[in-house]
Image (cartoon, helix red, strand yellow):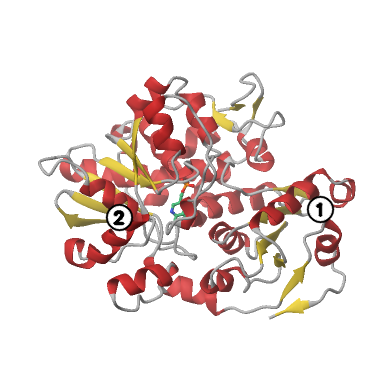
């Protein structure tokens, strides 16, 4: 299997090159050249999520140096459960929040971390991953790469602009993971990463890579939980479940479409968004337009110009083709709050603000709708206590893996948003520290 750039389809690379580069040289995103034909029959005898993952991803790694390592990478990716839980009215919740940082981004980050560690085994110089984060991605990446050999991670976050709980998830790391608090906003962090990639000194002294959500190495593993859940449903009920995916940058929703394109028994795919309107606007009008990002209660979905839109439009070139493939529902903050408030009574569940958008989309269906629906739970509600606890009226217990991550403590340097300041810190020289 080769991967091609959305902008230059005859630019083709292997899986491991696509993983290490992240972005194609022409600025495009890597997409698989084709989708293998893998109906439920192809998975006979595969029941665990690690096994299903290995079977599904095998053609995607075919011919690549990572092919032999794939089973061990799939085992390293999971190691935590991904239950599909029935909550009544033909509705099932796919809980993607049992990993170390209690959100679905753990899956992609752990797959990418193990793949890059394997690829850099025995390299003279470690690979340096630079990540700018507004909160959750950085934590998932830090946790995933921690103690992997031959890979170093530098996580930049805006000091004072993330929640206390997010900060605790970002600042406990040591060894090969260095977190840096930047006196600025998220855009300053992102600008620093971009500058480093273009700077001669950095290029000379570091092998740089990124781990952001446009990396195909985060998308491919995300197909695997859709594969596992839909097969489980198919084997029990003999039907194709429809799926509702809380969406922002569209990586998770695209992974679901990819799994369906491979032949997995998935019915309709509905993207649930918050107030940000690029997806619903595009589906309604057929004209893609980027919008200013709006701040909502589902912060990890606050995206005005989703980067994976480029992949979606590549696979479904016309608005009509896209409308055949997906639907979308836009959910306001008041509706998110309402679904969280009534969650314990209506569904016997405490929802997080992101998952609540999918619940609202489910509630908007015709009451006579007889299909089975999978709601994708992207995060544990304990990640967002400021929003959730006042609405449900009680404290939400922090799951153990997340509590372990937050219990770690390590001093974090604080810098002005300049490349020189970052270099001083990452280069190993003394720097003032906080906390
Ligand atoms: C990142 C994130 C999303 C959005 O996922 P995309 O792949 O960007 O669409 C939804 N929920 C949570 C909790 C997230 O962290």
Residue 1 badge: none
Q: Position of residue 110 (x, y in %)?
A: 54, 55
Per the image, label 1 sits on a secondary structure element best described as loop
Mark in the foreground, 1 or 2: 2
Q: Position of residue 328 (x, y in %)?
A: 34, 38
Is there CB contact under 8 Å for labels 1 and 2? Answer: no
**Dot 2 corresponds to which residue?**
335
* 298 to 424, vertically: above or below: above
Location of the C terminus by quadrant is: bottom right
Q: Disc 2, ligand 1: is the CB inside 8 Å?
A: no
Residue 37 in view: no
Per the image, label 2 sits on a secondary structure element best described as helix
Residue 382 placement: quadrant:
bottom left
Tell which circle, 1 or 2, labels the residue nearer the N-terminal end.
1
* 326 to 292, vertically: above or below: above
Location of the N terminus by quadrant is: top right
Q: Is residue 43 left or right of residue 112?
A: left
Extreme-left residue of the structure:
368
| Marks 1/2: CA–CA distance | 50 Å
Residue 412 placement: quadrant:
bottom right
Q: Is residue 2 left or right of residue 378?
A: right
Q: Position of residue 312 (x, y in %)?
A: 48, 30
Q: Position of residue 284 (x, y in %)?
A: 37, 29
Q: Nearer the viewer, residue 129 or 60?
A: 129
Residue 354 in view: yes
Residue at x-position 49% and y-position 55%? 295
Q: Is residue 65 left or right of residue 324?
A: right
**Dot 1 corresponds to which residue?**
125
Residue 254 placement: quadrant:
top left
Residue at x-position 74% and y-position 47%? 194
């Amino acid at each position: 299997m080769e991967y091609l750039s959305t902008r230059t389809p005859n630019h083709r690379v292997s899986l491991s090159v696509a993983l290490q580069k992240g972005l194609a040289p022409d600025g495009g995103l890597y997409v698989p050249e084709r989708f293998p034909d893998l109906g439920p029959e192809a998975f006979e005898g595969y029941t665990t999520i690690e096994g299903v993952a290995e079977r599904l991803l095998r053609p995607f790694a075919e011919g690549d140096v990572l092919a032999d390592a794939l089973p061990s990478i799939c085992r390293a990716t999971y190691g935590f459960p991904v239950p599909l839980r029935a909550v009544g009215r033909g509705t099932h919740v796919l809980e993607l929040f049992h990993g170390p940082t209690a959100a679905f981004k753990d899956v992609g980050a752990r797959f990418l971390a193990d793949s890059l560690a394997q690829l850099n085994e025995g390299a003279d110089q470690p690979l340096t991953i630079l990540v700018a984060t507004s909160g959750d991605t950085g934590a998932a990446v830090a946790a995933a790469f921690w103690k992997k050999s031959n890979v170093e991670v530098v996580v930049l976050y805006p000091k004072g602009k993330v929640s206390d709980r997010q900060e605790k998830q970002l600042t406990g790391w040591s060894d090969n993971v260095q977190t840096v608090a930047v006196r600025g906003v998220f855009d300053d962090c992102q600008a620093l990463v971009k500058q480093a990639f273009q700077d001669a000194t950095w290029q000379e002294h570091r092998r740089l890579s990124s781990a952001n959500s446009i990396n195909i190495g985060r998308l491919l593993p995300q197909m695997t939980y859709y594969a596992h859940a839909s097969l489980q449903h198919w084997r029990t009920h003999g039907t194709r479940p429809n799926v509702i995916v809380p969406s922002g940058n569209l990586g998770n929703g695209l992974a679901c479409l990819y799994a369906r394109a491979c032949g997995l028994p998935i019915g309709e795919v509905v993207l649930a968004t918050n107030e940000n309107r690029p997806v619903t606007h595009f589906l309604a009008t057929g004209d893609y337009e980027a919008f200013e990002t709006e701040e909502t209660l589902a912060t990890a979905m606050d995206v005005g110009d989703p980067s994976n839109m480029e992949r979606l439009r590549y696979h479904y070139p016309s608005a009509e083709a896209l409308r055949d493939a997906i639907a979308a529902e836009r959910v306001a903050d008041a509706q998110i709050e309402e679904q969280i408030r009534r969650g314990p009574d209506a569904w016997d569940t405490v929802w997080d603000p992101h998952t609540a958008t999918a619940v609202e989309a489910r509630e908007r269906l015709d009451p006579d709708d007889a299909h089975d629906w999978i709601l994708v739970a992207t995060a544990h509600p304990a990640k967002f206590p400021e929003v959730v606890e006042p609405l449900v009226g009680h404290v939400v217990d922090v799951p153990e893996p997340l509590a372990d991550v937050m219990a770690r403590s390590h001093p974090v340097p604080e810098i002005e948003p300049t490349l020189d300041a970052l270099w001083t810190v990452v280069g190993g020289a003394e720097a003032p520290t906080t906390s």
